[in-house]
Image: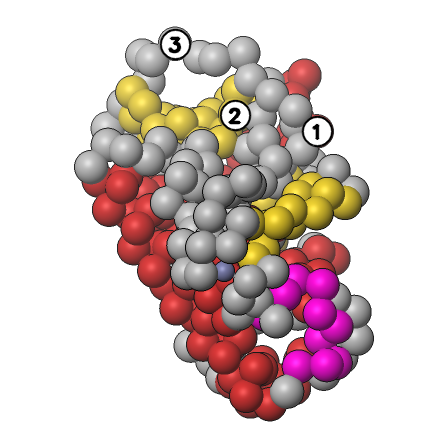
Amino acid sequence: MPELPELELLRIKLAEFLVGRSIIAVVVDPRRQVVLRYPPADFARDVTGREFAAVERHGKFLEFAFKDGGARLIVNPMLGGRFAFCTRAAPELPSTCFTLQLTGAMDVRLLDAVQMARVYLTDDPAQDIQSYSDTGPDALDPALTFEEFERRLKRHRGEIKNALRNQAFVAGIGNAYSDEILFAARIRPLRRASTLKPDERRTLYDAMRSTLAHAVETVRSRYAAGKHPLHKQDRSFLRIHAKNKTACPRCGHRISSIHSGGETTYFCRGCQL
Ligand SMILES: [Zn+2]
């Protein structure tokens, strides 16, 4: 599942490709129109002729704004949603859900073999999309101050890892980056949020910001160097996540893992308290 750093790279690349281009035609595959949360028959009519002005991100949602300021295209890629930017002549892959034909004989296509992505067209996402309105502030939102983070954290009594992954608390963090943030903060994932002392809450907030900001920069530079594919989560540079049976890079203790609900949590018993 993509998390904030990978989605931020995707947002940047989509903006570079799309801003200034207009949609001249739309092709929806009726066998894959389940991804559209908008009447498929109206979708083509309501986006054709519009020019992209910006691509923004709200947690795990990508938001495409148009120059006319009207309804925005909002995509939650979920597990399988991928974008292809290509020439009109490029062969169409079988998992293509829809194609936006753009000026300059270019296409942007939404691919999803498992059809879990969700696509909306709305001028009021907070009203029209339940999972969007439930989403808390983005973990890198400048408006998310420590005071606001701490205030929101007080609502969570359970394990701190689950709070960090809860999109209603802060948005954009999943299984991998919650491990990295807790490692940076030297806090064990299974600690109850309510047991964190004030200085630990501050450390956690700072670790969240610095870990994610650093990951965005790392993913961007690895992509620029041809080492990071746009849609695969290359997380080989992470410090603790998926580093089972290796030594902790900070204290040398063997890294521990816990399996639960089909996911694995990684942490160090030597230096996380
Ligand atoms: Zn350690």
Q: Residue at x 28, y 39 (%)?
A: 223
Label drawn at residue 34: 1
Q: Residue at x 77, y 45 (%)?
A: 260
Which quadrant would residue 228 be assigned to in this image? top left
Q: Where is residue 198 drawn, in percent x and y?
A: 60, 90
Relative side of 143 to 167, left or right: left
Between the residue at mark 2 and the residue at mark 1, the CA separation in whole angstroms equals: 12 Å
How far apart are labels 1 and 3 at the CA level?
22 Å
> Badge 2, how many Cα within 10 Å: few under 14, some, many 20+?
many
Q: Magenta region, mostly helix, strand or loop?
A: loop
Secondary element under disc 2, as helix, strand or loop, is strand
Q: Is mark 2 within 8 Å of ligand 1?
A: no
Residue 245: give x, y in percent of width and height: 54, 40
Report the disc number at residue 111: 2
Asked whether the beta carbons under mark 2 and mark 1 sit within 8 Å of each other, the answer is no
The mark nearer the N terminus, 1 or 3, is 1
Question: Taking 81 as reference, is 20 left or right?
Answer: left
Front-lying residue, 62 or 234: 234
User: Magenta stretch?
Assistant: 187-196
Residue 191 shown in magenta: yes
Q: Secondary structure at mark 3?
A: loop
The location of residue 45, given as percent across then percent down, is 54, 35
Confirm whether residue 32 shows in the render.
Answer: yes
Q: Amino acid at mark 1?
A: Val
Q: Amino acid at mark 3?
A: Pro
The residue shown at (55%, 33%) is 81
Q: Residues within 10 Å of mark 3 (few under 14, many from 20)?
A: few
